[in-house]
Image (cartoon, rainbow, N blue to C red):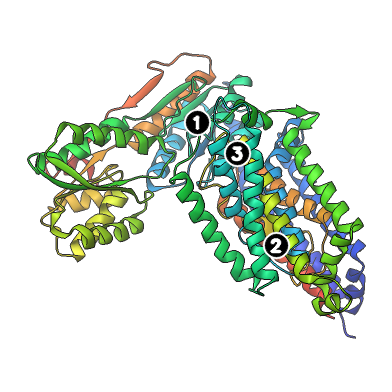
Amino acid sequence: MDKPALLKTALKNDKISNFILFFVFLSLFVFFSFSTTSFFNTNNFMNILRQSAVTGILATAMTFVIISGGIDLSVGSILAFAGVILGSIAKTGNDRWWLGVIAALICASLLGLINGVLIGKYKVVPFIQTLAMLTIGRGLTMLYADGKPISDLAQGLTGIAKMSFMIPVVAWIFIITIIISHLILYYTVFGRSIYAVGGNEKAALISGIDTVKIKIMVYTLSGFLCGISAVILTSRVSSALPRAGDGYEMDAIAAVVIGGASLSGGRGNVWCTLIGVLIINILGNGMDLMNINSYGQQIIKGVIIILAVFLDSVKNKE
Amino acid sequence: MKKSLLHVAASILFLTMVLGIFGCGQSSETTETKETTQNSKKITVGFSVYWMSEFSTLMKQAMEENAEKLGVTLLVADGNMDPQKQLAQVENFINQGVDAILCAAIDRDGIIPGVEQAKAAGIPFVGINMYIPNENVTAYVGPNDVLAGELAAGYVVNSLNGTGNVIVIEGGEGFSATEDRRTGIKKVLDANPGITALAIKTANWDRSKAVTLMENYIQAYGDKINGVIAHNDEMALGAAQALESAGMSDKVFIGGIDAIKDACIKIKAGSKYATVFQDPILEGTLGLEYAARLAKGETVDPVENFINMELVTSENVSLYLKEE
């Protein structure tokens, strides 16, 4: 019991680490509010919400996977694949464009299911399996779309990103996703089992949890959420781009890690991920408004990740 | 134990400092511009660019040099080849209340929501370098890419006296430059039935990808290849490199576009290579001028300004190769 003992016990109490997380978020908020005039206004907050939705929902998917002790590198590729499926069906003049949405969600879930089965049933390491799916998904996307963007989409689809009830509909979708995910994680047997599997798989197995089934469900859910993200992104840029989502897995992982989830599994929650997402997006938005170049932005993002992981490693030293 | 709490505090402090460093650089810049705005109303122009290539960097420098003269504060955002990021940048510009937006679009369709939002906010939106086919775009300054394609293909076809086999290496999909250069090249190939296109494929503007692609084609077609037409110099140079390794460089004619320095050097060295010059300085200057005039409520003519393109061969290369 040497020097960092107190801190460790302090941080063990999640309330304090959550407080630090919120403090960082608030400092950024205050900092940008005072250093640039165009940050603190409703219009910009709507922008931040809109800009957060896509990576936010991917980060929510990643939260489930990381709590279960895994990782999903394929979210960006699954998003792109679902996007081109959606785009190819929801073309201009198709009144039943929502069929495209359903097809996209099914295809995305299917890729997630494949991840889940191989990881859960055949014990492939999640990092390797989803890395493989990252390249397979991108390849399928390029093949399906012939490498070309699909434009001329149905008005109904492109209209989603333009609609607004108090806040943009896109942001509502994000917020509702967060709330439902929270309810799943905290109040369902499935949700509690995810924590159990991630915390100690053997113990979970002994206590009668079907760990294989839980893992399959987690990765399928992750795929499904990628599908929702794809609908939002496609609507937002009003075309389905085969290059879409390239590298988004890194932003999603960063948000979850900044939110304090442990990469070794068993810990984390979607509200903290939400703060993580907002921190990343406020950084991007604020620094854009201040006209700081993107190279500086990358450095600062990295520093925040290190800070978050540092807190995590202190927490886990015991 | 207090030490560790200090660590956390120090990390947060460090973070604030890093932010401070970038922040400070910014604030001193803005105070500087404020001083010069005393007498006339300063205009703010937001410029979102696909990414900082050699070409767009020259364009940006030209803008920066002319900004003061035009009474413009220039904000530059690098889209890093992500269409959603570029859209967010345009939205941020609108929110900042800039007086005009200049945009070198990553995706001609993906940027449309931004164009419409600018229109709704009453902010002039000027396309630059990449053509955006939409009626809400206020004005455009950029290359005549169809002509560029025609010139590059024309060089290869004429050098082969209208008979032979060529490889076409295309740019990335979604770019107006790819579409238009493709149209120009197709026009020339269609007019010359003696020329056969052995293969048409993209190397995504990338030199190293073009090397691989060309190596594969050399493997497949060998001596049948008489010419290469590429959508930019990077890829044309990649193809040249592969041909050189295969010992075929003195048999194959190569046409590129952009007249980057490496390409001009190659032409000067006497290679069977030609390129098409597109002036980044002229384009950047004119683009910013258009944005400034529209921001002041003046009109521009022509609304779509296609900059002329010139074929660069061994005869005129010295005009374009600036010695340092």
Q: Which residue is mark 1?
A: B102
Q: Look at the image and tell me in which quarter the N terminus of chain A lies.
A: bottom right
Q: Measured along the vertical axis of the image, is residue B163 above or below residue A91?
A: below
x, y (%) of residue B274?
Answer: 18, 44
The answer to whether tags 1 and 3 share a subunit is: no
Q: Measured along the vertical axis of the image, is residue A3 above or below residue B133?
A: below
Q: Amino acid at mark 1?
A: Leu
Is residue A258 visible in the rendered structure shown here? Answer: no
| Separation of marks 1 and 3 at Cα, in angstroms | 24 Å
Name the element at disc 2: helix
Q: Which residue is mark 2?
A: A305
Is residue B206 visible in the rendered structure shown here? Answer: yes
Q: Residues within 10 Å of mark 2 (few under 14, many from 20)?
A: many
Q: Amino acid at mark 2?
A: Ile
Q: Residue at x 77, y 66 (%)?
A: A213
In this rendering, position of residue A184 left or right of residue A140: right
Q: Amino acid at mark 3?
A: Thr
Q: Which residue is mark 3?
A: A234
